[in-house]
Image (cartoon, helix red, strand yellow):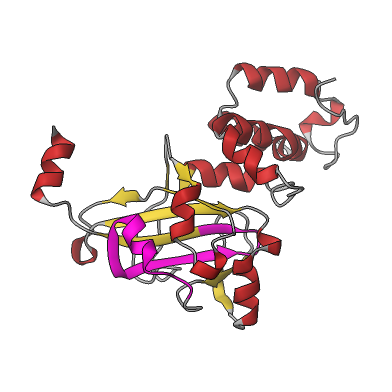
Amino acid sequence: MLVAKQYRCTHSAHCICIKGHLCEDALYLVFQHLNWNPRLIAVMSCVCKWFDEIAKRVLWKEFCLARAPKMMLDLQSCGSHNIDGNWKALGKLLIYCTGSTKGGLFNNLSIPGHFVYRTRFSRTSGKSLLMPQCRNDVLYVSDPCEHLDQGDEGDIGFFRGIFKSFSVSRVKRMLIDKGAKFHPTEVCPYCKAKLWSMLQAKMIPRSASCRLGSYDEYVEYFVCLNGHMLGVCTLLPLSDSEASEVEA
């Protein structure tokens, strides 16, 4: 048996699926054939609560395992269970750049969120975003998603990431020891948990701007209670020689 069976619909008697659902094993095989297409998983989740539950419990997990197998294996190793029950949030983090709304996390930036076809997440890059005393923590971070020519703001890069075992990390311990405050209004766009500002906590090392290719004073990122990270930076312009290499 591929999936633990559920025999009863868990929602309203008015739901059109109350007369019965597709066998979960069959649903698993259909989405396996579709290579765990995230768009179709999201569409199916909107049908009813039963479909949404199986998507959260099974389909988003399989999508994450197929999309980034080595990263998922590491996140689940050493008894880490920080992503159990949050596969949908992690799936969204893998493929969605949140952008920024005016007056939101990143002040006056107004750049629409969008899906990203491919993103590289790096554990090595993640270390550059951590204070020296926290570099035993594991953080996977994406390359910046570039939004060029944003007027007075210049070239903007959004990046996102995920901590392994954030609940027992040095970063979380430091944030608590510093008495860092949660953002008063905004929450994590991936899981709706409360957010800490790493800038306000003075926990952004200079190595972060070097790794991101940005100005020192224009790097900011937030971490939520579930270990999701999202940030923004102002990207350095390419030199003429670098631009020639890129265009070649």
Q: Locate the C terminus and report the quarter of the image it occupies.
A: top left
Q: Residue at x 59, y 59 (%)?
A: 137
Quarter-of-image position of residue 170:
bottom right
Is 241 placed left or right of 185 in the picture?
Answer: left
Residue 179, above or below 9 = below
Q: Residue at x 55, y 32 (%)?
A: 67
Quarter-of-image position of residue 103:
bottom left
Count of numbered circles on the image: 0
Closest to the observer, 173 or 63:
173
Q: Residue at x 29, y 57 (%)?
A: 156
Is 227 placed left or right of 21 in the picture?
Answer: left
- Find residue 227 and report its horizontal and vertical position in percent: 61, 58
Q: Locate the N terminus and report the quarter of the image it occupies.
A: top right
Residue 211, above or below 220 = above
Magenta part of the chain: 203-229
Is 192 placed left or right of 155 in the picture?
Answer: right
In the displayed orientation, state which residue is furthest to the bottom.
Answer: 179
Residue 141, above or below 203 = above
Residue 39, above or below 29 = below
- Find residue 91 and report its horizontal and vertical position in percent: 58, 41
Q: Residue at x 63, y 33 (%)?
A: 65
Closest to the observer, 93 or 71:
71
- Is residue 222 something that shows in the picture? yes
- Find residue 136 and report its horizontal and vertical position in percent: 58, 59
Q: Is residue 163 covered in magenta?
A: no
Q: Is residue 223 covered in magenta?
A: yes
- Find residue 110 and report its horizontal and vertical position in percent: 34, 61
- Is residue 46 something that shows in the picture? no
